[in-house]
Amino acid sequence: MKLNKKSKDNYITYAIVMVAYLIFQILSATGNLSSHMTGLLVPMTYYAVIAVALNLCVGILGELSIGHCGFMCIGAFSSAFFSKLTENVLAWPIRFFLAFVIGIAFAALFGFLIGIPVLRLKGDYLAIVTLAFGEIIKNVINAFYIGVDGNGVHFSMKNSMELNMEPDGNLIINGAMGITGTPHNSNFTIGIIVLLLSLFVVQNLINSRDGRAIMAVRDNYIAAEATGINVTRYKMMAFVLSAAIAGAAGVLFSHNITTLTASSQYFGYNASIMILVYVVLGGIGNIRGSVIAACVLYLLPELLRGFSTYRMLIYSIVLIVMMIVNWSPRVIEKREKLAAKIGFGSRKKIAR
Amino acid sequence: MKKYRKVISALVAGVMTASMLAGCGSSADNSQTATTEQAEGEQAAADTLTFKIGAIGPLTGGAAAYGNAVCNAAELAVSEINANGGINGYQVEYSKEDDELNAEKSVNAYNTLKDWGMQFLVGSTTSACSIAVSEYTKNDNMFQLTPSGSAVDCVKYDNVFRVCFSDPNQGIASAQYISDHNLATKVGIIYDSSDVYSNGIYQKFTEESAGKNYEIVSAEAFTQDNNTDFSVQLQKAKDAGADLVFLPIYYKDASLILTQANTMGYSPVFFGVDGMDGILTVDNFDTALAEGVMLLTPFAADATDDLTVNFVSQYQAKYGEVPNQFAADAYDAVYIIKQAIEAKNLTPDMSVSDLCESMKTAMTEIEATGLTSSKMTWEASGEPNKEPKAVVIQNGAYVSAQ
């Protein structure tokens, strides 16, 4: 079978993910994986998933979104709400699957609703609106009080006393206290499956007719429109898909931690910018890079725990160094020369 | 640039593998650097058994003051215990981990401590983190004593106990105190709707206030995103004629509220809960404004009993600041663990799960004396029984209220 260059590139990405998965599974089966590392595996997968989602928006669609954690927040809350409701009704594999469907659907729906006004804007303006959107989602969810009892669903935006629930009622979303006691269903295998699926969707989209149209819109808006591409439609397609995948990351997130609060350390703009850092460091438009960068940058502060209070300082320095080494034109030039010297780069030059 | 993607990805993948291996390899070193000086002093007799106590709290970021207070005080208690011959003759090792006020990182911190060999957990410092961690301590059946996780759900599992009052208890106690002492007829509330702690107290306070001899005339919220200007909330309380303003919030925000109330010439009685403790230490805050402020707190740093005086002077000497109630709770927590271990004659060679089982029964049997109360007992549910103390600020110091 002859593979063209692009699909070969895609297969390398899947292979990297699967090899990493196998290595970790073997390590954990043989008892060589510390509980610290085991605990980091699931967060690594969902940060990789949301990095892929954001890369679709920033790299392929070419629109800077700095509120992507807002979609993750929607996915997390809608799915956790569903799981809490049906915890004793459905068997966990079915429930968790439905939780994914619901989380993704809600995130996509909001992606669509936000997309209508947002995609009329470009560049900085769009970035600011997405930033505002992320903050709005967070604050609105913080004001929600939803409880369920024998009489149905009670809703308030004021406080839990306003719900007037029966004593046997179950308070599901408790304002700023969010949702506690979401069943712990996420595991590394499911995380990897979600990551592979989102990679599959995004990489195939990029290499499809639609993907090329999306990139044409990114590269030259006017030219794309002149050639008959429906700009709004393709922009919306990429944006909604990106929101949906971010929603899937949210589902993994909410089923990994039992306390889900819509606070800024998880869903604020700082968190969104952290995801953007993953994408930028991994390479804008480079899906595989996002996955690797997300894993490395999530692991880094954890592995630096040995340095106690200095770790945040070291983390920031490492971040600066990595950015310079990876993307500074001077360093790239020097690296190019070095690579040519050892014969690695020159061969590649001929190859292309 | 494009042709170097492969080189870059190979490089980054290499870095990742290397860092992973480094992480695996260095875990043993980490635990050694993290142990206290006392434990290092014991290196000569490295094969002797030790109890291992771990603490988790936000050591970096906005809530670092709380996490550092907890971790420092626990460290102080451990070094005192070691200097006095340890627990049942065994020395105690201590390690702390940062959770950045993030439940996810708190679980990571817990796993790190577990790899280190922790047997007892003092933490997490904050409620949401503590709840997330309790899910894991439950699975491992590890004994967890949270010094300051005050949300109801923190002690949901039978292996988790707490030192501080729960949020609802503080709300109930405040309502009762105000009613019993006829402090007010009209009460205004300003609370932080984005904070679990503040919300919990506010909700219970409101429920408990029904049928009391005062009425709640205003309840205004703010969030951590707009906690600099409180003039609207204060104006509403003032317009409603509130003669007491209940502030179930942390002291930083409270200090601004007091300053702004003074500016607008509004001077009701301000009534706080234990989060208000520390208001006298806020930088650039005129402590004269806090005159007459009442608060329910389990700990006052300028109390004159020997235990408090000793703790405050030791803490100040070592860390250069006056300890707050978080520190007091954590200091007590370590001593409570010590007392429970001694009550059951436990030894460090027992498994974590066996230790936990014995600790569970020990906790319901012991009666502890500490900084935060002279008499503390525990229910099997994990809730402490202790008397709330009300203090009033006079001449820049806490005085027991009548």
Image (spheres, coloured by chain):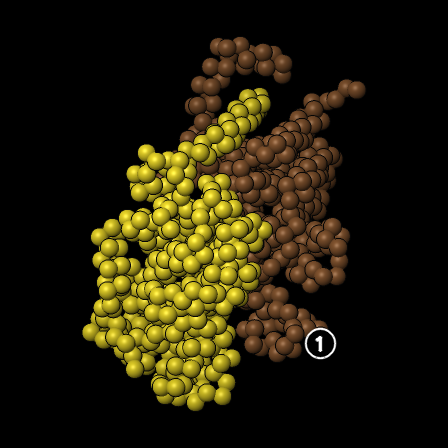
Chain colours: A brown, B yellow
To which residue does mark 1 refer?
A151
Look at the numbered disc 1 and give the secondary structure of its residue. Answer: loop
Horizontal side of A118 relative to B213 (left or right) equals right
For the point 29% across and 79% down, the residue is B401
Along the line of sight, the residue nearer the viewer: B121 or B129: B121
Q: Residue furthest right?
A: A1
Count of numbered badges drawn on the protein: 1
For the point 74% across and 22% down, the residue is A3
Q: Which amino acid does label 1 sit on?
A: Asn
The x, y position of residue B163, in whole percent, is 42, 63
Along the line of sight, the residue nearer the viewer: B151 or A209: B151
Q: Is residue A296 above or below residue B326?
A: above
Q: In this view, does B274 lie above or below B98?
A: below
- Residue B170 sits in which quadrant? bottom left
Along the line of sight, the residue nearer the viewer: B108 or B314: B314
The x, y position of residue B272, in whole percent, is 36, 73
Q: Which chain carries label 1?
A: A
- Inspect this view and state whether residue A23 appears: yes
